[in-house]
Each structure stands twice: as C-alpha cells, then as structure tokens.
Image: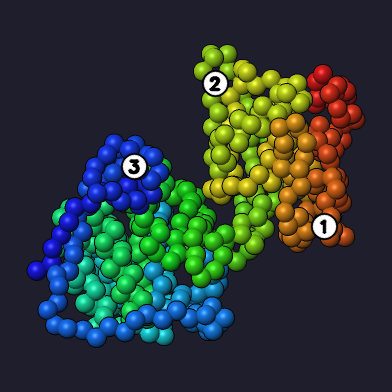
C-alpha cells in the first residue's frame, strides 16, 4: 500500500517545509504554509533492470518546432503562441462569468472538426453543457462529454480515448481519493495538476484546465500551480462590456506578452482581428477629458481612448478612482501636474477610465492621461485626429517608448492625422501624420492646445488660462 507523509506548502511561492511555521522559510511570507499530504509509492519487490541516464550535448538535440494544432481563430492562436502544442498543459483563469467556459467550448468545436475532444465538466451537468454548446453553435459529434470530478476516472478516460484535446472545467473541482482534503484545497489542486501534467506528456495529449481566481485576481490555489503548467492565460474584461482580452502571462512555447481580443455577443464569443477599430468605433465624440493613446500589447499596437473627469469636492473626502489604469500611476501623474504645472487637485475628485474595458499596463499612456486631465479641468477638448504617445518622468520630462514606429503606423492606418511623441525618437514616420516632438509635459500641453509656453522652472501664463504660474 502507498505510504503518505505530511509536509507544509507555501501558497505564495510553492516552497515546502517539513514542519509548520508562521513564516515561510523561502519567500518570508507570513501565514502561508498549509498542511499537505504526499503519497509515497511502496517498494516493488520485483527486480528491475535500470539503465543509467545519459546526458546529451545541447548541440545534438533536435531543433524541430513542436507540432501545433492551429485553430480557426487567429486571436486564440496568437495568445497560445501559434496554436495548441501536443502534450501541453494550459491553465486559463478569469473572473466568474467572464467567458472561460464559452471560450473553451468554441475551441473544442473547432478542434472537433478534425479529431476527438474530451470535455470534462466538474461543475455543470451534461444537460447544462449541451445547452451551452447548442446556444454557441458548437454541437459537434466528436465532442465527448464526461461529467466527473474523480481524478483517477478522468485520467483513465483520457488515456483510453486519446483525444486531440482534453478540457477540464475546472481544476478546483477535481479530487484524488487517495489524498486528504476537499476539492479546491492546496493538496488536491497541486497533486491533480501534477498528475495531469505527467499524463499529458506521456500520451502527448494537450489538456486545458479552467482555474478559478481569488478576490485579487490571481488563480486560486497554490502559486506552484502556475509553475507546473506550460501556459497560463487570463481572460480579462468587464462582464458589462463587450470586449474580452485573453492575455498570456506564461508560455513555454511562445511569447508571454501576446493577447487575443474577442467580443461577447448573443451567440457567444467572436474574435476581433482589428481591435483598434473596434475600440475607436465606440469612442465618444470629441469632448473635454478624452485622449487617444497608442499602447502596445505584446507585438500588437492598440489605439485606446482614455477618459478623465475632475470634480470639485469641498467635503475633504477626496476620491481617486481608476478603471483600466493602475491607481498608483494616476497618483504619480497628478503629483507631476501639481509640481511641474502648478496645478492643484487638493480639492478635486479625479476619475479615470479606459474605454472598452481595456486595461493599460505600460507607461506609454502617461502623457495621454496627463493631457486628458488638463483637458477636462480646462473644459477644452483635445484636437481631432490627435494621438498621444510618451512616458512621463517625475521631473515632467517626456521619455521615449519602444516600438514607436509600429504605434505611429497603427495611428495612420486608422485615419489619425497628428501625433505628439517624445523628442529625439528615431522612428520611421508615416507621411500621413503630422509629428510634433515634445520634451516636457509643459510643451505637450502647449502643443496640444496651441497655447504659447516656455518650458522650465517658470511657466509662462497661457493666453487661455491653460497654464498657471
């Protein structure tokens, strides 16, 4: 009979300890060690002839790329790094209701047109899964459904069927009868994922896992779960918005910076091959407080509309709310505007939102956000056809950003006519764009609103009151 031993696993770093302690000995986090029971196989009395392992020179290894199954959706292929790799283990996380099961049902239908797909449902009944597939137009005879949560049964069916793709929805519902703990516990999640990883490699079947997320947006369970799998994808987006972003945060078979863009409609998800056009199509008419910025998601430039609103508040309970932008980044930009442009937000609420439910993670949108706030405060709209690109430093300088030429080409392709960029940038410039280089946020305000200004410690009073001394 297999024997078991008790160890303690850190839910943050995945480190192990033989005894419980208040602080993890590896990452120094407090109260993160949880009890974990590990089975050890008993000794086999039969003698075995073991061949010693032999190291192979790195230059002698084969260089062929891993074979991939390409899906009909190019956006999903992009996020996966070019398609589904045989024997890979992919973890997909996201908030409840964002569309994880919907996305995987679409993927299952596309793969089922060329081979068998096993869909394992641990949360829904078979009738519920069929109803969703019918609603999405994904009813395919090659999709095999298994409503089961026992790990041994699931592994047995996968090994017997050898499908072209296996989907387990979700890993938090899978349990191993040989381990203590309820479904979703550290013990069950870690061991179940490790067993499925070994199975995927042994029989060369790709397995997709659905993972629940915690309140802070990270995948529930031990952090080591993300280290076990080959690829980690997060499906992001506001459930009240149309757009969804599939973001790769780890990928052993491709870039970990790519995203796929989808739109949620009545018949499920649809890929959006030109996300900039989709975002700008829903943009509001030119109004104070709006600016168009060019961000980069992986290798793809996106044109995004940033909106801001400042409102006087005499109560003293100031609010700083940011949707789609890190609120700490907003605080920094407000501090730069106060110090370098002598503006005061001490009695104003500041609200910032990125249209379409997009989340901006790079600093190239700093200058656009700053100009958006100035535009709203002065009730003056930004010029039509203007795109703003640049990182903002603490001294008010506008810093250069990467892949500027790609951003400018995207802006010109969508009909924008003018661009504010950092000075000294050495990028190819589309002939259809009027390029204006700026060195500081003061120069950027002057260029955007056509007001005379002199950069430096003393700021000249603008004719329209845009800048104060």
Q: How many numbered marks, from 0 up? A: 3
Looking at the picture, tell me which residue is in the foreground, 195 or 19: 19
Q: Residues within 10 Å of mark 1 (few under 14, many from 20)?
A: few
Q: Is residue 75 visible?
A: no
Does residue 55 sit above or below 133 in this rendering? Answer: below
Return the residue at label 1. 427
Of the 4 image quadrants, the one containing the N terminus is bottom left
Does residue 122 sit above or below 115 in this rendering? Answer: above
- Residue at x 57%, y 81% (from the top left corner): 59
Q: Position of residue 432 (x, y in %)?
A: 85, 58
Sequence-earlier tag: 3 or 2: 3
Return the residue at label 2. 318
Q: Assign a secondary structure to mark 3.
A: loop
Horizontal side of 398 relative to 360 (left or right) equals right
Is the residue under label 2 in contact with that under label 3 (CB below 8 Å)? no
- Residue at x 31%, y 63% (from the top left corner): 193
- Tell me the CA gap for discs 2 and 1: 41 Å
Q: Residue reaching furthest top?
A: 315
Q: Position of residue 385 (x, y in %)?
A: 78, 49
Q: Nearer the viewer, mark 3 or mark 2?
A: 3
């Amino acid at each position: 009979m297999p024997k078991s031993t008790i160890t303690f696993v850190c839910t943050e770093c995945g480190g192990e300890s033989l005894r419980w302690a208040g602080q993890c000995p590896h990452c120094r986090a407090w109260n993160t060690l949880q009890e974990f029971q590990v089975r050890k196989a008993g000794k086999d009395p039969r003698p075995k002839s073991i061949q010693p392992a032999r190291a192979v020179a790195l230059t002698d290894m084969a260089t062929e790329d891993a074979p991939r199954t390409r899906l009909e959706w190019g956006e999903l292929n992009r996020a996966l790094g070019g398609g589904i790799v045989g024997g890979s283990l992919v973890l997909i996380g996201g908030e409840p209701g964002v569309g994880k099961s919907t996305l995987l049902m679409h993927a299952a239908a596309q793969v089922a047109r060329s081979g068998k797909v096993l869909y394992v449902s641990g949360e829904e009944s078979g009738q519920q899964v069929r109803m969703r597939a019918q609603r999405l137009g994904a009813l395919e005879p090659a999709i095999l459904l298994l409503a089961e949560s026992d790990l041994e049964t699931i592994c047995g069916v996968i090994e017997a069927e050898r499908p072209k793709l296996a989907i387990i929805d979700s890993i938090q519902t899978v349990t191993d009868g040989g381990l203590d703990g309820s479904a979703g516990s550290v013990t069950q999640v870690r061991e179940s994922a490790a067993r499925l990883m070994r199975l995927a490699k042994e029989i060369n079947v790709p397995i997709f896992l659905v993972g629940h997320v915690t309140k802070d947006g990270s995948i529930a369970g031990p952090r080591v779960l993300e280290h076990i799998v080959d690829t980690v994808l997060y499906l992001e987006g506001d459930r009240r918005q149309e757009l969804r972003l599939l973001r790769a945060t780890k990928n052993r078979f491709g870039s970990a910076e790519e995203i796929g863009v989808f739109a949620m409609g009545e018949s499920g998800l649809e890929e959006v091959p030109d996300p900039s056009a989709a975002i700008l199509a829903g943009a509001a008419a030119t109004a104070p407080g709006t600016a168009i910025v060019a961000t980069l998601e992986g290798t793809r430039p996106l044109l995004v509309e940033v909106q801001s609103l400042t409102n006087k508040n005499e109560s003293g309970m100031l609010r700083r709310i940011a949707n789609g932008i890190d609120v700490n980044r907003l605080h920094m930009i407000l501090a730069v505007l106060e110090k370098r442009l002598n503006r005061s937000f001490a009695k104003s609420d500041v609200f910032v939102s990125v249209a379409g439910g997009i989340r901006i993670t790079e600093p190239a949108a700093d200058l656009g956000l700053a100009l958006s706030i100035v535009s709203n405060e002065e009730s003056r709209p930004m010029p039509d056809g203007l795109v703003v690109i640049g990182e903002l430093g603490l001294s008010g300088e506008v810093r250069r950003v990467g892949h500027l030429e790609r951003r400018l080409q995207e802006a010109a392709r969508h009909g924008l006519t003018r661009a504010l960029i950092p000075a000294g940038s050495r990028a190819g410039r589309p002939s259809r764009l009027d390029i204006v280089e700026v060195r500081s946020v003061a120069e950027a305000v002057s260029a955007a609103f056509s007001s005379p200004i002199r950069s430096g410690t003393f700021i000249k009073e603008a004719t329209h009151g845009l800048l104060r001394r």
